[in-house]
Amino acid sequence: MSSARTAAVQPVAPHLDASGWPASPVGTPALAAARLALLRDLTLAFRRRGELIQPLAFFAIVTTLFPLAVSPELSRLREIAPGVLWVAALLASLLALEFLFRDDAHDGTLEQYSLSGQSLAWLLLAKTAAHWLLTGLPLALIAPLAAEALGVSGTGLAGVVASVAVGTVALSLIGSISAALTLGIRRSGVLLSLLTLPLSLPVLIFGARATELAIRGLPFTAPLELLAALAVLGITLAPLAAAAAVRISLE
Amino acid sequence: MSWTWFHRLASPPYIYGLAARLTPWFGWAAALLILCGLYGGLVLAPPDYQQGNDFRILYVHAPSAWMSLMVYTTMAVAAAVGLIWRMKVAHAAAASCAAIGASFTFAALVTGSLWGARMWGTWWEWDPRLTSELILLFLYLGYMGLRGAIEDTQRADRASGLLAVVGVVNVPIIHYSVVWWNSLHQTPSVMRLGKPAMPPAMLLPLLIMLAGFTLLFAALLLVRLRGEILNRERTASWIREAVQA
């Protein structure tokens, strides 16, 4: 029956589907389109492998600064370790944000996305997911190494990984809004930090708290759940705001 | 019900004239209320039994802090109206709010810090309210920075409007996370004002000051809005008539 209806509509307006909306290219549903966008971003990133290391190197360097600046005593470092890890992770994820949409805005990919008839919010969510897979997840994986270097013993490391992994999801999503807002602005780096950091404070607070509890061997699920709540809120709302911001910058 | 009043609100010449007519009313009412409130607060109100005369900075501090949040909300509502109905005047109003709000926030921080120096012995305490206020100042600065960085007025309006709306969703989250953070790290050793047991002689001047500051904001907003409209409509023909009149 549906084929009959399509047949009836097609001669009139072949680019519209039966309900009058623009038909998506080759009938790709939103999820499949998002998957394609995600795979494209990952492929592009792996073609320039050198750049993948940069946020991790930055994270390692910032972590190194603290023993040099504060004290090499492990007992003192252990106390400030959660804060050091989280500030370093926040800055590393911030540094990578500038490149989240920039290249795609330059070469017109974002414009194509917004004209594709697919939901722009889904595609941006996919791009943000790729960004997290390339920065947040690796940061979470090397965070235990940095924690170890700051004198944290082995038991709390799983908690460190979990809190950094969940927290960076929220950070990437918050950052996607400000990255989209600052598109097309020259020397946007400082402005990007000024927009992102105040909004990411809750993530920093709950993340550092979860890490601290994990390091002390205490139950850390409460702050971790709050962190996850922030991430879920981000997944729900941030792509919509980012899509609106991208549309504004494309005008 | 007729919607003409709403459509008229979208017309820059109408708003420009309305703002010019309303400004003296709000301005003089604000001046009167603030003078009354200051007299009541600084002269008539009795000294606090714990803080003596030091508590009197409350009459500037609390209204500033109250205004810092109210102006942000006003800005976000104006920005949302501008985004939804594409109303240029609403964007102009949101743009006019930012500097006023940042100034109130700054005033709240400075008076809070002065108060803290007398009461807590430090110029800065990582108290949740002071910290939230500082973050609010950063939000204002971010808004103004974004608006300043985009040259095209319409794009600047829409981008900064979106930021204001995103910010207003986040303000409660930030506030409660800061409160939560603080309650974990700091014992409640800081002396606080006994909130419920405030005698009327102390409370009444505070309420008058709140009303005065609100009207002051309205007056400042109308003045800045006229400037903003003049700047945006500088090529329009009605401006020449309005300025010459």
Image (cartoon, coloured by chain):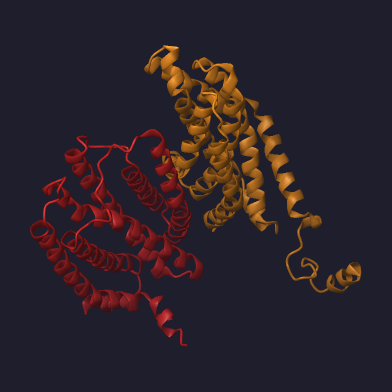
Chain colours: A orange, B red
Residue A131 location, x and y as percent?
A: 61, 38
Image side of residue B48 versus residue A140, left or right = left
Q: Nearer the viewer, residue B42 or A118?
A: B42
In this picture, residue B77 sits left or right of residue A168: left
Q: Position of residue A155 (x, y in %)?
A: 59, 20
Whether residue A250 is situated above or below residue B121 in the rendered picture: below
Residue B138: percent from left, percent from top: 36, 45
Compared with B80, A83 (above or below) is: above
Residue A109 visible: no
User: Which residue is more in the foreground, B236 or A230?
Assistant: A230
- Residue at the image point whose x is 50% and y is 47% from the top: A178
Q: Point out the image quarter for the C terminus of chain B.
A: bottom left
**Residue A76, quarter of picture:** top left
Residue B204's image quarter?
bottom left
Image position of B46 (left or right of A114): left
Q: Position of residue A14 (x, y in %)?
A: 81, 67
In which quarter of the view is residue B10 placed? Answer: bottom left
Residue drawn 59% across the image and 23% down it? A157
Q: Which residue: 32% across, 78% down?
A: B238
Residue at left offset 37%, top offset 57%: B72
Residues A13 and B137: in front is: B137
User: Can residue B64 be seen by looking at this rendering?
Assistant: yes
How many labels were placed on the picture? 0
Determine whether, in the image, residue A51 is placed left or right of residue B175: right
Residue that lies at the very extreme toward the top in this rendered image: A73
Q: Nearer the viewer, residue A94 or A24?
A: A94
**The residue positioned farthest toward the left in the image shown:** B43
